[in-house]
Amino acid sequence: MKPMAERVVMDADEISRALRRMAGEITEQNRGAKALCLVGIRRGGVPLAYRLRVLLRELEGLDVPVGSVDINLYRDDVGTSLAAPIVGRSDLHFPLDDRVVLLIDDVLFTGRTVRAAIDALMDYGRPRSIQLCCLIDRGHRELPIAAQYVGREVHTAYDDRVDVVLDSDDRADCALVIESDADDGA
């Protein structure tokens, strides 16, 4: 078995620039940040939500509420492929009713995680709207879901893995594609 190839598709500076650009797009599209709340999908979307909060504070002078949502019990495969799902905590300490919820994830792939997150959000209230923000859109959608705010589109094979590394003691912020070894002839 050959080692998996890894390529950096975004370094720390590119991630920072992408988040700054997306924060500007978010405030422009929503005429400010007053009605917004940020909800990161556990796990990868949570640190991105907090980084966007800082940028929105710089742009708008507002502390936008930030929360998180765990989707494990809302997954469409929870009864078939997860013998004992590990359920994390959702942390939504503010009302969602009549708010614009900016749902944030690190990587958008098939759309199934986002669908589960939307289902989970609806248990907490009825937002005015839900907008999707992701750092990496890698395509391969299985559901009709699209992000309004995207850091970068990255073309991948279906079996590749995309990892976003943030706040690591071992590595600088980056986004990586770990290529599958499906083409090794085995």
Image: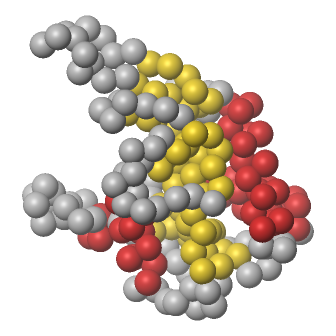
Which quarter of the figure is the C terminus placed in? top left
Instruction: Name above or below for residue 103 compared with residue 83.
Output: below
Instruction: Name above or below for residue 158 compared with residue 58.
Output: above
113 or 172: which is nearer to us? Answer: 113
- Report whether 119 appears left or right of 47: left
Among the 4 quarters of the image, the one containing residue 98: bottom right
Among the 4 quarters of the image, the one containing residue 63: bottom right
- Report whether 104 appears left or right of 73: right
Inspect this view and state whether residue 42 appears: yes
Instruction: Name above or below for residue 108 compared with residue 2.
Output: below
Taking the view exactly as shown, the residue that stands out farthest to the front is 144
Residue 24 spot, x, y in % from top left: 82, 57
Name the residue rendered at 49%, 89% in the picture: 125
Residue 83 spot, x, y in % from top left: 10, 58
Inspect this view and state whether residue 165 appears: no
- Report whether 147 appears left or right of 16: left
Q: How many labels does the image show?
A: 0
Residue 167 spot, x, y in % from top left: 59, 39
Among the 4 quarters of the image, the one containing residue 69: bottom left
Which quarter of the figure is the N terminus placed in? top left
